[in-house]
């Protein structure tokens, strides 16, 4: 299959892109499209063929449910069995935006979307191309992130192309995603409501509407409880090379990474750091994403950096960490997953060698 990419910043091409997207979706084909978080791989929720295509194209396990994307004017009763006043308040405040709500599922929603669960995940993305695509097609679109299962989510059309070339007919190129990490998932079918995946909408802001919201205990890396969002149990967001993260103060982190680098001379080593620390390390590949003063810029750069380490053939990776507040909660959730539990010992005593598996 030939994969066509349409540049949505060019008016003529955008016009074509919207028309082709509407045709593809209605015909049960898959379209990759930009959102403010990451690129999605879409299918019309009414097409079993399109839904099946998503799992095939991604190599996604079929027990992992999809997020339904909606647009202004869409009748939520088509997907959700009940909209409580609290749910309405969240939608009014944070949609369109990086917030996915788990709601009781309307009967007609395909079990391919919900993976057999009695609930459905819904969000209204805050991206003009995503909204216009759905509005023109007049269809709600189920979409996971448009990466191959297990790879970092795509934040540019080029990332989507890397993973999906030849697997889907159409990619709408809307440039780089502004947020760069997936949406926050809130389960509104439990009391108190529970955050199943930290994301682009911070806990602090959700508390303005839901003061009693809790974080799923299954989210902590050490947890022996299964996370409630089926997708959170897979090794995700991971580069190919093993990755180790440093903890503690900036100085402790620097010491730990320098020591680990020294212990791994001879390997192709990569460091994930920030602009302020770019010159602190000597390694084959150093990627400084964003600035410590502005963790949003780090979030926006994380997935591209992970893919870049793969492209540059790194064999071992070391990453700095940031405080788990604001967008830092989502950033650290993804980084921990990418590291698969690998934590460097604090500098100057022991190093990564002691942990090799
Ligand atoms: O920002 C995002 O949310 C992006 C863009 C494309 O919208 N989408 C995204 O989809 O990240 P995906 O499939 O990569 O992640 C969806 C997550 C998975 O962890 C899945 O298990 C969970 O949502 N999920 C979906 N439906 C659910 C449900 N009914 N109950 C619990 N978790 C659910
Ligand atoms: Mg995903």
Image: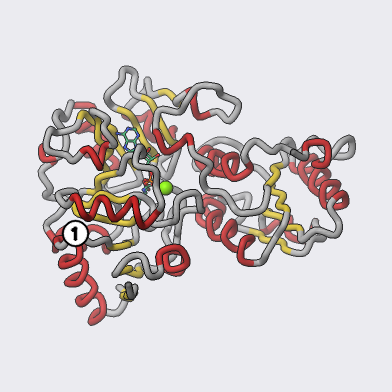
Residue occupying image coordinates x 25% and y 42%: 113
Residue 71 visible in the displayed image: no
Q: Secondary structure at mark 1?
A: loop
Say left or right for 154 vs 223. Answer: left
Q: Quadrant of the N terminus?
A: bottom left
Figure check: 211 above or below 355 = above
Q: Answer few, some or many: residues within 10 Å of disc 1's Cα (few below 14, many 20 plus, some between 14 and 19).
A: many
**Is 235 in front, or is 100?**
235
Say left or right for 110 vs 56. Answer: left
Figure check: 52 above or below 231 = below
Colour scheme in use: secondary structure
Residue occupying image coordinates x 33% and y 57%: 41
Q: Label 1 belongs to which residue?
A: 28
Residue occupying image coordinates x 82% and y 52%: 261
- The image quadrant that residue 291 belongs to is bottom right
The image position of residue 315, as x and y in percent, is 72, 57
């Amino acid at each position: 299959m030939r994969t066509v990419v349409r540049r949505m910043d060019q008016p003529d091409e955008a016009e074509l892109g919207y028309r082709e997207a509407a045709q593809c979706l209605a015909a049960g084909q898959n379209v990759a499209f930009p959102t403010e978080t990451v690129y999605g791989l879409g299918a019309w929720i009414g097409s079993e063929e399109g839904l099946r295509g998503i799992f095939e194209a991604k190599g996604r396990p079929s027990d992992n449910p999809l997020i339904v994307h909606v647009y202004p004017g869409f009748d939520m009763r088509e997907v959700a069995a009940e909209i409580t006043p609290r749910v309405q308040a969240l939608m009014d405040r944070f949609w369109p935006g990086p917030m996915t709500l788990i709601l009781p599922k309307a009967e007609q929603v395909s079990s391919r979307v919900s993976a057999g669960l009695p609930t459905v995940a819904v969000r209204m993305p805050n991206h003009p191309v995503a909204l216009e695509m759905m509005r023109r097609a007049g269809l709600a679109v189920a979409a996971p992130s448009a990466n191959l299962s297990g790879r970092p989510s795509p934040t540019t059309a080029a990332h989507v192309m890397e993973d999906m070339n030849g697997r889907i007919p159409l990619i709408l190129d809307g440039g780089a995603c502004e947020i760069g990490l997936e949406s926050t998932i809130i389960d509104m079918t439990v009391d108190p409501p529970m955050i199943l995946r930290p994301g682009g909408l911070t806990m602090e802001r959700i508390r303005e509407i839901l003061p009693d919201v809790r974080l799923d205990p299954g989210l902590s890396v050490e947890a022996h409880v299964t996370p409630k969002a089926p997708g959170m149990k897979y090794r995700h967001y991971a580069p190919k090379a093993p990755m180790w993260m440093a903890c503690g103060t900036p100085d402790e982190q620097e010491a730990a990474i320098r020591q680990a680098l020294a212990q791994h001379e001879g390997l192709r080593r990569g460091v994930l750091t920030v602009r302020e620390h770019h010159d602190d390390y000597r390694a084959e590949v150093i990627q400084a994403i964003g600035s410590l003063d502005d963790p949003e810029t780090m979030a926006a750069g994380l997935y591209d950096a992970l893919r870049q380490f793969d492209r540059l053939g790194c064999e071992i990776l070391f990453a700095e960490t940031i405080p788990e507040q604001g967008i830092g909660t989502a950033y650290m959730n993804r980084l921990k997953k990418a590291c698969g539990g690998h934590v460097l010992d604090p500098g100057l005593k022991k190093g990564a060698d002691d942990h090799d598996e």
